[in-house]
Image (tube, rainbow, N blue to C red):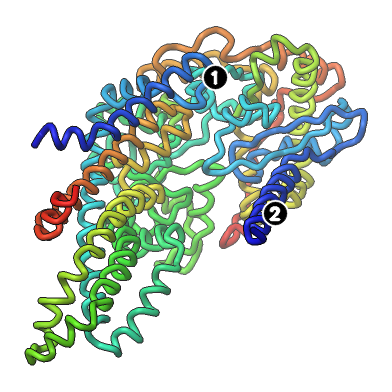
Amino acid sequence: MRLEKKRRITRWLIVLALFALVAASCSSDDGGSEDLTPVKLQLQWFTQAQFAGYFAAVDQGFYEDVGLDVEILEGGVDIVPATVLDSGAADFAISWVPRGLVPREEGLNITNIAQVFQRSATLQVSFADSGIGGVGDLAGRTVGNWGFGNEFELLAGLRSAGLDPASDVELVQQQFDMLALISGDIDAAQAMIYNEYAQVLETVNPDTGELYQPSDLSIIDWNDVGTAMLQDAIWADADKLESDDAYRETAVKFVEASIRGWAFCRDEFDKCAEIVLAAGPTLGESHQRWQLNEINNLIWPSPQGAGTMDTALWDQTVTIATSEGILNAAPTDGAYVSDIVAEALANLTADGVDVTGSDWSPKTIELNAGGE
Amino acid sequence: MIIKALRGFAPALAFGIGGLLLWELALLIIQPEGFVLPAPSAILIAFFDDFQVILTASKNTGFIVVTGLVGGVALGVVWALLVSRFRIANETLTPLAISLNAIPIIALAPIFNAWYGLLSPVSNQAIVVILVFFPVFINTTKGLTEVDATEIELMRSYAASSWQITKTVRIPNAMPFFFTALKIASSLAVIGAIVAEYFGGRQDALGPLIVQNAGLTRYTEAWAAVLAGSIMGILLYLVSGAFERVSMPWRTATETAGA
């Protein structure tokens, strides 16, 4: 009898302990001051200069000036920004356009409110002595790609050259690094011009003892091939935009302050690089400076104002998506909206902020080994 | 005999079909927003829509599963025989096996890719071998060593050699243990092969199919690939069961007599 009672008490204690554990982990943290609206931004990838504008806007108080307290959520391999946004765990998300359109077709009602990157940054990189000059040369070679929705430009590019991705090339699941290319496992690797491409240039060439040079590499740029698709954009919850006026107002303020952050990163390059480094990225200073330079090159100049949708590229993106079978049909109306960014740009222009960056020209950044 | 077999399966079948119907109805009634958990009917439709792709992927993954399973089982059995026969082997090989088992497999996958090459099947087969080896080794060793002492004494009284004792007493004793381990190992092999595929390699395999569709919120397609993996695991389990029946006829006889 005594043992029975002891067991019962133990069991209840365990239940209580578990309950307390769950309750503690569920408690919301009260971060931010009273008058500011708390906002969560879900990034598409790990902290790096790719998202410099948002970090700068936080650091320079641009969000605070418009009454927002923004918390930036780092992304990762298994984090899908569209689902984080749709579930309400974030208020806005950064995502590539195809990676936002597919979930949208699956039923997640999200919308593109600002097309931040005006051009695609995806490359297919190979060594210059591999003989891969253009897309056609990929026939019969091992071609790496990351999957997860990053491979569509490559697949469309292969088809545009008359190659069948399933049989004319050997597609390989590539890790998010360039080791497979450097070790010779694959002939052509997927790389972002602002990230993995630089990783090769930060590696020592065993033949020369020096860092790899751009002349050692041969690149295929999907912008040139004509199968580029739109990338980083700010996405919002479409249902909320319609039903919640406060959320829409927050969206305008968020876009406004974010673009101001990007303008800051264009005009105050060194300070912006410092801000990114302070946010704790994995790769070092020279890598982040390279990345910031390339990112600026994707945003500026923006003749219609940063964040405005380039309808020609949008149509190209949609055409590729539907012909590749990524989307079953063209996206319904409302996949992107222009009013929010238009309002934000009007506010910024009235405030004297340069939103077109017509004077922008890329810098020359020197890379150090390992990206340090 | 067929009716008898069917009667044996009936409760399991009813439970399974009942569960699926419940799932389907629950979704129809609740209608959760978006994509959370697709209905079994949607998964089946996706399975047949993508059948060619899933079939090719299953063949590629299945090759790794089967070859890795065979390799891991062979390694485990040989190791177990050595350990049960030689005390020195027991003192050296058993701790080694335990340490090997303690290494997190997820950490090994990218390392093997670097060693054997991204496209080489060896890197994935090695993961399966390591996963499969330990349960087979431990269980077979137990079966080979925990033998009734009187049986060993009887054999010794016949002046039987070590090998004869092993062949006539230890191995038959170990068979039930071995087959238990084989059934565990077959599902581990499927899991190991799929997870190893997450870390790079060919894309026409079940692992990338699952994880990439999930990454694009195409959960119906992801579940269809998961279904293929489950079918593979179940098939292997059934094959193990068949091997068990064939190799231990004395067991089957007593079972049916008692049932």
The residue lying at 17 percent from left, 81 percent from top is B151
Q: Give B238 or B110, whichever is nearer the viewer.
A: B238
Task: Determine whether the residue tagged by mark 2 lies in a helix, strand or loop.
Answer: helix
Task: Classify residue A256 by image quadrant.
Answer: top right
Q: Are marks 1 and 2 in contact (CB under 8 Å)?
A: no
Give the residue at mark 1: B32
- Residue B142 position, x and y percent, is 29, 73
Chain of the residue under label 2: A
- Residue A358 position, x and y percent, is 70, 26
Neighbours of disc 2 within 10 Å: few (<14), some (14-19), many (20+): few
Chain of the residue under label 1: B
Q: Give A88 or A265, whichever is nearer the viewer.
A: A88
> Is residue A198 among the parts visible in the rendering?
yes
Hey, what amino acid is under mark 1? Answer: Pro
Quadrant the N terminus of chain B occupies: top left
Task: Classify residue B17 by image quadrant.
Answer: top left
The residue lying at 31 percent from left, 24 percent from top is B44
Task: Classify residue A237 by image quadrant.
Answer: top right
The label nearer to you, 1 versus 2, is: 2
- Residue A259 position, x and y percent, is 74, 27
- Residue B232 position, x and y percent, is 25, 42
The residue lying at 70 percent from left, 19 percent from top is A305
Label 1 vs label 2: CA separation? 39 Å
| Relative to B141, residue A107 above or below | above
Farthest residue to the top: give it: A333
